[in-house]
């Protein structure tokens, strides 16, 4: 693997006094007022241990996503659940399409799995040959990928993934799908695999709640899978893995659909605005994506991704240099979609650098 690294470090001093962070893909609307109020009201409850069954949170997840509580396992963020799955199942060979979120491979290797990469090509917009990928997945123990994928933003529909899912029937193979950015996608109703966990016992869907609801510091997500696997994973995790405040915040956040719709409207409009402005800049190619971020091909600018990232950093703007993603090089940047005035500031600064 390439060197482990995520986005910019907002805890380091900013040359401008404060960071404008385009390196982390968090809801630009920020923390929901109702969630903030809930956190303040329940701060006193940190003197107690969390509910080990996360009853209220599971009920809220089940109602919001339309799945039974017996199929739900809350976690300390999506990453905990990914690592937990591989530690419990101890699979021999794991297939990961790349570029992808690095923790898929890290989690598999930590469980002593052999990782096989399926390289996605930029000239094809990082869209895989699903037939070839299905053939490759057929000789592995687990196929893991993001939908929408990070950092490409590409998305599959359930119809497109059915041939892969059918391979799981009656077999011992697993499919682990990370839907951490699914709530941002306009295509989510046709793309999410959550409705299929009842039908396919070897399907595991991982879902983050902290990106869409702008509370990554709380760490919150859930796995949707068969009740048998829920019990198996539960037996292997920390009893109090989801803290009091995260449980309360998650339950409240899921009860406010108006925030969800406002978020998707903002991301849809600002993503289109950024795509238009970025595509007009010399040497930049913007990949179409379904999530709240954009992958930029900057090879044609004459600048490396690290040089652009550093120049922006000197002006208090953080972006994600993608050079350390498997199968990418120093010609790719990922930028989050933020509020309009912030996006304008980023675009103007990038134009000045180029």
Image: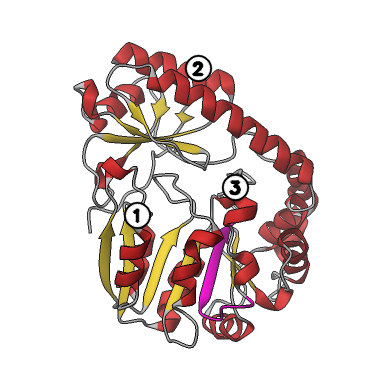
Residue in the image at 36% along x and 54% along y: 100
- Name the residue carrying label 3: 187
Q: In this orientation, which residue lies closer to the viewer: 260 or 191? A: 191
Using the image, determine if residue 277 lies above or below residue 265: above
Label placed on residue 211:
none
Q: CA distance from mark 3 to mark 2?
A: 27 Å
Q: Are marks 3 and 2 in contact (CB under 8 Å)?
A: no
Residue 340 seen in render: yes
Compare marks 1 and 2 and give the one earlier in the sequence.
Answer: 1
Query: Nearest the camera: 226 or 11?
Result: 226
Query: Residue 126 vs residue 177: left or right?
Result: left
Q: Secondary structure at mark 1?
A: loop
Counting from the top left corner in percent of width and height, residue 338 is at 54, 30
Q: Is residue 16 visible?
A: no
Q: Which residues are magenta?
A: 198-211
Indicate the quadrant containing the C terminus: top left, top right, bottom left or bottom right: top left
Q: Secondary structure at mark 2?
A: helix
Q: Earlier in the sequence, mark 3 or mark 2?
A: 3
**Residue furthest top as drawn:** 352
Depth check, front residue: 38 or 85: 85
Determine crowd level at label 1: few under 14, some 14-19, many 20+ residues with C-alpha closer than 10 A.
Answer: some
Q: Residues within 10 Å of mark 2 (few under 14, many from 20)?
A: some
**Whole-percent x and y of residue 120?**
29, 52
The residue shown at (27%, 41%) is 123
Residue 68, horizontal then vertical, whole percent = 73, 73
Instruction: Residue under label 1, please give it.
Output: 128
Residue at mark 2: 344
Crowding around mark 3 (Cα neighbors within 10 Å: few <14, some 14 to 19, many 20+) is some
Task: Please tell me how many numbered marks the rendered image carries.
Answer: 3
Q: Where does the N terminus fall, quadrant-wise?
A: bottom left
Front of the two marks 1 and 2: 1
């Amino acid at each position: 693997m390439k060197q482990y690294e995520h986005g910019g470090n907002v805890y380091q001093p900013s040359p401008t006094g404060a960071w404008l962070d385009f390196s982390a893909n968090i809801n630009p609307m920020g923390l929901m007022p109702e969630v903030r109020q809930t956190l303040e009201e329940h701060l006193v409850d940190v003197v107690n241990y969390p509910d080990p069954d996360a009853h209220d949170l599971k009920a809220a997840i089940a109602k919001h996503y339309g799945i039974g509580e017996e199929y739900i396992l809350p976690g300390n963020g999506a990453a905990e659940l990914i690592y937990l799955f591989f530690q419990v199942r101890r699979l021999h060979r794991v297939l990961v399409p790349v570029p992808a979120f690095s923790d898929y491979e890290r989690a598999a290797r930590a469980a002593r799995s052999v990782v096989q990469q399926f390289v996605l090509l930029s000239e094809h917009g990082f869209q895989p040959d699903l037939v070839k990928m299905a053939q490759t997945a057929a000789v592995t123990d687990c196929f893991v990928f993001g939908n929408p994928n990070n950092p490409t933003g590409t998305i599959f529909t359930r119809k497109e993934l059915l041939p892969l899912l059918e391979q799981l029937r009656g077999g011992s193979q697993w499919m682990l799908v990370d839907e951490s950015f699914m709530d941002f996608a306009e295509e989510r109703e046709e793309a999410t695999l959550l409705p299929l966990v009842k039908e396919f016992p070897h399907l595991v869907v991982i879902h983050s709640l902290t990106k869409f609801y702008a509370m990554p510091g709380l760490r919150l997500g859930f796995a949707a899978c068969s009740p048998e696997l829920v019990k198996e994973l539960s037996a292997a995790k920390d009893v109090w893995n989801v803290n009091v405040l995260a449980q309360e915040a998650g339950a409240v956040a899921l009860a406010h659909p108006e925030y969800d719709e406002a978020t998707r409207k903002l991301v849809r409009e600002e993503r289109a605005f950024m795509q238009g402005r970025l595509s007009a800049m010399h040497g930049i190619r913007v990949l179409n994506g379904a999530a709240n971020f954009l992958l930029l091909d900057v090879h044609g600018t004459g600048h490396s991704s690290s040089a652009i990232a550093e120049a922006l950093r000197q002006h208090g703007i953080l972006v994600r240099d993608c050079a350390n993603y498997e199968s990418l090089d120093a010609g790719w940047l990922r930028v989050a979609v933020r509020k309009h005035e912030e996006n304008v500031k980023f675009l103007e600064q990038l134009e000045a650098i180029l």
